[in-house]
Amino acid sequence: MNYSEREVFTRHGGAYDRGSADAWYGREVNPHYFTGATYQSTKIEEVDMSKEEIAAYMAGYNATPFAQKEW
C-alpha cells in the first residue's frame, strides 16, 4: 500500500507522527509507521520503508528535539 507524501507527514500513525511520538517519549530512533491506526494495524519497519518515509520519520523525530514528556 502506498501513501502520498502528504499522508506520510500528516496521518496519525504515519512516519512523521511515529517519529515525533518516539522523540516525545524519549525512545531511541527506530524508523517505522503503521498502515492504519497506531498499534492496531500493520507495522512497517525501516527495512521496508522508502527513503522518503524514513526522512519523514526523522523529520518528526527532530521537529522538537528538546520537548519530551515529563514523567
Image (tube, rainbow, N blue to C red):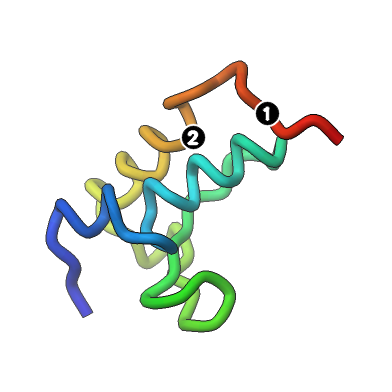
Q: Position of residue 64 (x, y in %)?
A: 50, 23
Image: 21 above or below 43: above
Do labels 1 and 2 touch, CB within 8 Å? Answer: no
Judge by depth and name the residue closer to the eye, 7 or 44.
7
Q: Is 65 on the left-hand or right-hand side of 55?
A: right
Closest to the camera, between mark 1 and mark 2, is 1
Q: Find residue 23 and report its image quarter.
A: top right
- The crowding category of the residue bearing disc 2, from other C-alpha atoms within 10 Å (few below 14, some 14 to 19, many at least 20), is many
- The crowding category of the residue bearing disc 1, from other C-alpha atoms within 10 Å (few below 14, some 14 to 19, many at least 20), is some
- Which structural element holds mark 1? loop
**What amino acid type is highlighted by mark number 2?**
Tyr
Q: Quadrant of the C terminus?
A: top right
Q: Position of residue 8 (x, y in %)?
A: 26, 55
Q: Quadrant of the N terminus?
A: bottom left
**What amino acid type is highlighted by mark number 1?**
Gln
Image: 61 above or below 14: above
Q: Position of residue 16 (x, y in %)?
A: 38, 46
Circle number at residue 33: none
The residue drawn where x is 40% and y is 61% is 12
Residue lying furthest top: 66
The residue drawn where x is 38% and y is 53% is 15
The residue drawn where x is 40% and y is 44% is 57
Q: Is 50 on the left-hand or right-hand side of 23?
A: left
Judge by depth and name the residue closer to the eye, 31 or 38.
38
Circle number at residue 61: 2
- Which structural element holds mark 2? helix
Separation of disc 1 and disc 2 at Cα?
11 Å
Q: Is 63 on the left-hand or right-hand side of 26?
A: left
The residue tagged 1 is 68
Q: Position of residue 13 (x, y in %)?
A: 43, 63
